[in-house]
Amino acid sequence: MYVLEIIKWISIIGLIATSIVGNYLCRNYSALARSMVILIIVATAMYIASTTKIGKLIIIFGNESRTECRKVVWPTYQDGLNTTLIVTGVTIIMSLLLWGLDTILVHVISFGLRL
C-alpha cells in the first residue's frame, strides 16, 4: 500500500512537470490549446492526488471547512458599515493625536537644541 502511494505521488509530480515543460517547449502553439492540455493534465493529477491518503484528508478538511463557514453568523450590512465607520473615526482621531504629539516634540527638541 505504501509503495502505491509513492508511485501515485511520483506520477503527480511527473504530470505537473510535464505540463510546465510542455508549456515551455510548445510556446509556438496557441495559448488556448496549451491551456486546455494543461487543464487536462492538472485535472488528472488532482484526481490521482484525491485517491491518496493525504489527498483524502485534504478533501475531508475542505468539506469540514465549508460546513463550518455555513455555521458562521455573518454580520449584516448595517453592522459592517457601523464597524467600518467606527474604525475609520478612531484611526483619524489617533492620527491627529499622534501628529499633534509629534509636532509638540519637534518644537520641544528644537528649542532644547537651540540653547
Image: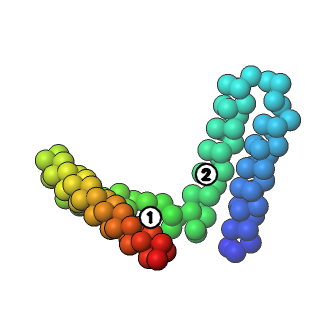
Percent across and percent down for residue 104 are 34, 67
Which three-letter amino acid code belongs to the residue tagged 2? Answer: Met
Residue to which mark 1 is pinned = 60
Whichever of callouts 1 and 2 sits on the residue coming sooner in the sequence is 2
Towards the viewer: 78 or 87: 87
Percent across and percent down for residue 18 are 79, 46
Q: Is residue 70 visible?
A: no
Horizontal side, residue 53 vs residue 83: left or right:
right
Does 21 appear above or below 96?
above
Within-10-Å neighbours for mark 1: few <14, some 14–19, many 20+: few
Tell me where residue 72 sits by quadrant.
Answer: bottom left
SS under mark 2 = helix
Q: Residue at x 71, y 26 (%)?
A: 31
Q: Residue at x 67, y 32 (%)?
A: 35
Within-10-Å neighbours for mark 2: few <14, some 14–19, many 20+: some
Percent across and percent down for residue 1 are 68, 73
Give residue 46's mark.
Answer: 2
Does 108 appear above or below 17?
below
Percent across and percent down for residue 84 are 23, 52
Outermost left residue: 78
Horizontal side, residue 42 vs residue 115: left or right:
right
Does 100 appear above or below 36?
below
Which three-letter amino acid code belongs to the residue tagged 1? Answer: Ile
